[in-house]
Image: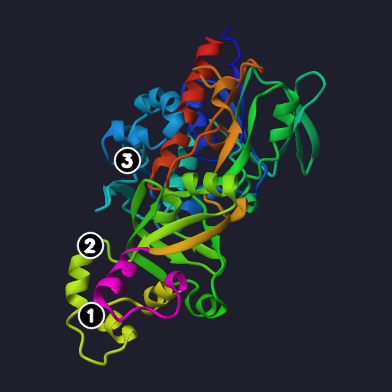
Amino acid sequence: MSSSPKTVVIIGAGPAGLMAAQRLARAGLAVTVHEKMPTVGRKFLMAGRGGLNLTHSEDLAAFKGRYAEAGARLGPLLDAFPPEALIAWAADLGQETFTGSSGRVFPRAMKASPLLRAWLARLETLGVTIRTRSEWLGWDASGGLRFRSAGGETVETPDAAVLALGGASWARLGSDGGWAPWLAEKGVSLTPFKPSNSGFTVAWSDIFRDRFAGQPLKSVALTFADRTVKGDAMVARYGLEGGAVYALSPVLREAILATGSATLTIDLRPAMTRQQLTARLHRGEKGQSVATRLRKLIHLSPAEANLLREGHGVDLPLDPGALASRIKAVPLTLTDVAPIDRAISTAGGVTLDAVDQHLMLTALPGVFVAGEMLDWEAPTGGYLLQACFATGLAAAEGVLSSLS
């Protein structure tokens, strides 16, 4: 007579939790996924709203370097499940991918929903049980996992558990960080949450805010301290956001927390040298205004031209060399970090010292952690999702090792 399969409860139905569920179910374990929201993968679907950036095609050594201090711990997990493996996984679900000019990898459908539907169908065939509207309430006095649903409160005592509840951004999609006090009570080491891949507040003039909020700054270069990032940004009513800003968000955030502000420098025409800009500005006709020269000779958009005045003052110099210098270095004072719930991701959470090499909590044997609950951060561009998938798989492998 065969024995009953080992049971595993996974809390959180995002990429990390569902990846753990797939691996464990394929190994023959009885897997139940609890999700407090009415549907699964809500943040995953949100990530795919503008084109699902699954991963990145750059060299793996450079890829792992995107995780900064956490790279040493995440490196072996990314080696075990690199971008090529994620691409193959998507193809196995019938979702072919392509690599864009920036090196980013996307499903050909450019949406998250077809991939998620295929994934859920695969999990169903593997026997995974998914319970939505099932909210985790921590542990009871005996160590059982408490859940609340429409049917009332229940307690489960699985052979192992995987926590994949996300960080603390986009609470309306399910990740609100509400789990932190329960883990702290159990002696798990935590780092306070901080916004990551976030925007920053700028004290715009009323005229600039009202006219240009929502306008892009295309192909600019942002510099802070010794780091320069080329890319796009976006003017927001509260300040500045966008991919190039997000890439600098960790260092900008820490500077603001330390000193109360940070001065970001924007090069509006990084493809041209100061000398080239000066030469072009010299072509201006006699009597031509600064605004006309910026529009006709440098092709600054209205948002860019007015950003120049926000940084340097309304009265810009007519002298070509002086004006070129200002175009190459627009100073903006960032006064605060945008609220954590507006951030794409979060830093903070369960410290990497609190888990072993299999992502099991040393304070809670048999309980594993995956995804953004762990204290790591990375820029946008596929790095966030790749680490969520990789840590979900690593947690599942840890469960299998502990139950073998």
Mark whose residue sits in front, 3 or 1: 1
The disc at residue 297 is 1
**Contact (Cβ within 8 Å) of mark 3 with mark 1:** no
**Magenta-tinted stretch:** 310-329
Classify mark 1: residues with Cα within 10 Å, few (<14), some (14-19) or many (20+).
some
The amino acid sitting under disc 3 is Ala
Q: Is residue 150 magenta?
A: no
For disc 2, the marked residue is 271
Name the quarter where the N terminus is drawn. top right
Task: Using the rendered view, name the quadrant where residue 78 is placed.
Answer: top left
Nearer mark to the viewer, of 2 and 3: 2
Q: Which residue is mark 3?
A: 91
Task: Please indicate, yes or no, whether residue 220 appears anywhere in the rendered image.
Answer: yes
Disc 2 from disc 1: Cα separation = 15 Å
Residue 298, can we see it? no
Examine the rendered structure and indicate whether residue 137 appears above or below residue 294: above
102 relative position to 159: left or right: left
Q: Is residue 20 above or below residue 50?
A: above
How are the colours assigned in the image? rainbow
In percent of width and height, residue 218 lies at 34, 66
- Which residue extends farthest top? 1
| Residue positioned most to the bottom | 287
